[in-house]
Image (cartoon, helix red, strand yellow):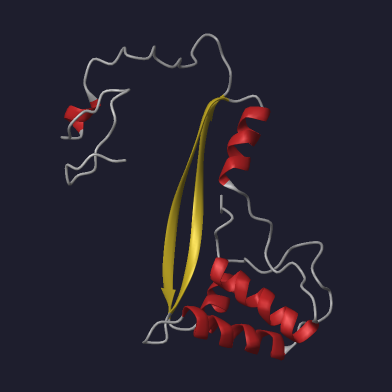
């Protein structure tokens, strides 16, 4: 599912443009979720061993209009029940497009669109086949060896890479 950081650039510019042109804001995107909320939801739904992971993908577009067109092609137009029902008008989108290009555009005029993808994994409770977490310290292999790094035992103070002790 898409997370709360999705289309942050576009959403910020649309809100600013709507404040400037209409004196208030209306929901412009479908509701997005926070990573912590999704993990809590899995637990409250009764799932066991929930795992939530995220990936952030930044897509580069030639201009803000290409972002709008791509979202429309994906069927990601505004489906929010609370949205403003009247026509937004060209001025709103012209202001949003201008702000998007000014605030986020690069030297070549390209603009980014951020997509936060949330991956959810959990088990339905079942005493017969549900995996159980291992006892702490029961590993047969050392993580430090697998990562080709130096192990710092618990309780010892870590030191920066330069070798100078941290304060």
Q: Is residue 88 above or below residue 10?
A: below
Residue at 64% in and 55% down:
32
* Image quadrant assignment for residue 142: top left
Q: What is the x, y in percent for residue 97? A: 58, 85
Say whether residue 72 is left or right of residue 163.
right
Residue at 24% in and 28% down:
152
Residue at 68% in and 56% down:
31
Q: Is residue 14 above or below residue 124?
A: below
Q: What is the x, y in percent for residue 116? A: 50, 56
Report the residue that reaches farthest toward the front: 167
Say whether residue 65 is left or right of residue 84.
left
Nearer to us in this view, 54 or 130 = 54
Q: What is the x, y in percent for residue 64? A: 53, 81
Q: What is the x, y in percent for residue 143? A: 24, 27
Q: Is residue 89 above or below residue 46?
A: below
* Image quadrant assignment for residue 65: bottom right
């Amino acid at each position: 599912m898409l997370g709360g950081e999705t289309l942050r650039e576009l959403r910020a510019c649309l809100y600013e443009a709507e404040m400037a042109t209409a004196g208030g804001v209306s929901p412009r995107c479908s509701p997005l979720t926070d990573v912590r909320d999704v993990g809590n939801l899995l637990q409250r739904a009764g799932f066991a061993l929930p795992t939530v992971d995220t990936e952030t993908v930044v897509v580069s577009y030639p201009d803000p209009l290409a972002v709008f067109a791509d979202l429309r092609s994906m069927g990601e137009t505004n489906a929010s029940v609370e949205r403003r029902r009247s026509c937004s008008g060209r001025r709103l989108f012209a202001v949003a497009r201008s702000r998007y290009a000014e605030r986020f555009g690069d030297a070549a005029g390209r603009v980014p669109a951020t997509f936060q993808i949330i991956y959810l994994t959990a088990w339905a409770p079942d005493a017969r086949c549900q995996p159980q977490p291992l006892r702490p310290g029961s590993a047969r292999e050392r993580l430090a060896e697998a990562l080709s790094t130096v192990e710092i035992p618990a309780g010892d103070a870590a030191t920066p890479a330069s070798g100078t002790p941290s304060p």
